[in-house]
Amino acid sequence: MSPPVETPAKQIGIAVVEYRGRYLVGVRPVGSELAGCSEFPGGKVHPGETPEACACRECLEETLLEVTAVELLLRRTFTYPHGTFDLHFWLCRPTSDGAVQDTHNGFRWVTNAELATLTFPGGNAPVVGLLTVNCTTS
């Protein structure tokens, strides 16, 4: 009998968008995997696309906000019940101050202290920890 064939981890680009000390966060919709969890904009990397470019593209598609990737905050592989994912968390910034609004297609700006109170998927825990390590709640 042959050993089981391992399915490669799906590459995911995630935009951790920071603007004036706040982060852009949405909530996963009903009917989706991990519904109700908070999320940063992101999604599957297309063939020939880098995770960095994916994070920027997904942010524009999901939030209608154009961003530039600044640096890779964290890369990790995480397994959920629905699959294994190679997560690339990119710190991003809006390309234009004038494009920033209070909300972006259902995504809103939260402080790092508020990030610590939200429920994110398990794969996001280390990056949320990085962003909230020096915050104090009042």
Image (cartoon, rainbow, N blue to C red):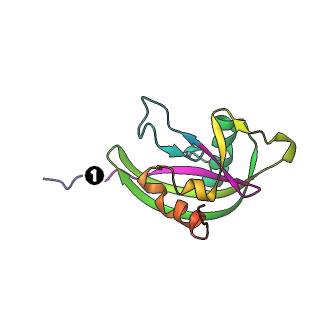
Residue extending farthest to the right is: 98
At mark 1, the secondary structure is loop
Queried whether the magenta region covers residue 39, the answer comes back as no
Residue extending farthest to the bottom is: 134
Residue 1 in the image, given as x and y percentages of width and height: 12, 53
Residue nearest the viewer, comparing 136 with 112 = 136
The secondary structure that dominates the magenta segment is: strand
Residue 50 seen in this snapshot: no
Count numbered badges in the picture.
Answer: 1
Question: In the picture provided, is 42 more to the left or to the right than 94?
Answer: left
Residue 4 in the image, given as x and y percentages of width and height: 22, 52
Question: In the picture provided, is 31 more to the left or to the right than 3?
Answer: right
Queried whether the magenta region covers residue 10, the answer comes back as yes
Residue lying at 58% horizontally and 64% vertically, measured from the top left: 132
Residue lying at 63% horizontally and 33% vertically, measured from the top left: 106
Residue extending farthest to the front is: 138
Residue 60 seen in this snapshot: yes
The image quarter in which residue 22 lies:
bottom right
The image quarter in which residue 105 lies:
top right
Residue lying at 79% horizontally and 42% vertically, measured from the top left: 100
**Mark 1 crowdedness (10 Å alpha carbons): few <14, some 14-19, many ≥20:** few
Residue lying at 63% horizontally and 49% vertically, measured from the top left: 55
Residue nearest the viewer, comparing 113 with 77 = 113
Question: In the picture provided, is 24 more to the left or to the right than 27?
Answer: right
Residue extending farthest to the top is: 31
Residue 101 in the image, given as x and y percentages of width and height: 77, 39
Amino acid carrying mark 1 in the image = Val
Where does label 1 land, which residue?
5
Specify the segment rendered in magenta.
Answer: 5-25
Quadrant of the frame with the C terminus: bottom right
Residue 35 in the image, given as x and y percentages of width and height: 43, 36
